Image (cartoon, grey):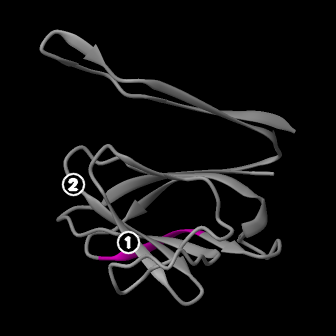
Amino acid sequence: MADFTSTITENVTLNGVVRGITRTNSIPNITDVYERVVTCLTGATTTVATFASDKAAAALDTELVKYIRVTNLHATADIKVALVGGATSATHFVAFGSSLILSVAEDGVVGEEDTTPGWSTADLVNIQVYNTSGSDIQVEVFIASL
């Protein structure tokens, strides 16, 4: 087991004044790390991680996941990242060089069709990346689990 640490630093100087913060989050007892760089083909949807409620082959255990990061490694092109649940999904725009960070897979996603949040949740089943650019894009995935 190991302690996992994530640090986010935001820094900008506006009118000669430095603004921003550094936030550090530590998660104890991490025993499993899933880390890979995936090439997402242009015009295609690529599943970059799969989750299940047990330790099924080729799936991460939904209940044990404590940190998820999907980073768009491309220098100019943007991507769409879908968080897919059993019967719902939510799509997020991730600009080039940016990341989408989640803290859980269990009860970690819900999509709604109106503007009034219902605050319901669903387990994450998979994460998909849609590449609309004219070239292939590499995406980095990092997941830490208990």
Circle 1 sits on which residue?
91
Q: In this view, does 35 lie above or below 130?
A: above
Circle 2 sits on which residue?
77
Image-based side of 83 in relation to 65, left or right = left
Q: Distance between the residues labelled 2 and 1?
A: 17 Å
Rendered location of residue 111, percent (x, y): 45, 80
Q: Residue at x 50, y 85 (%)?
A: 88
Q: Which of marks 2 and 1 is nearer the N terminus?
A: 2
The residue range painted magenta reads 44-49
The answer to which of 70 and 109 lies nearer the viewer is: 109
Q: Residue at x 49, y 79 (%)?
A: 118
Rendered location of residue 11, percent (x, y): 32, 22
Q: In which quarter of the image is residue 61?
A: bottom right
Rendered location of residue 131, percent (x, y): 29, 68
- Assign a secondary structure to mark 1: strand
Would residue 47 be counted in the magenta stretch?
A: yes
Q: Can residue 6 be seen in this view?
A: yes
- Assign a secondary structure to mark 2: loop
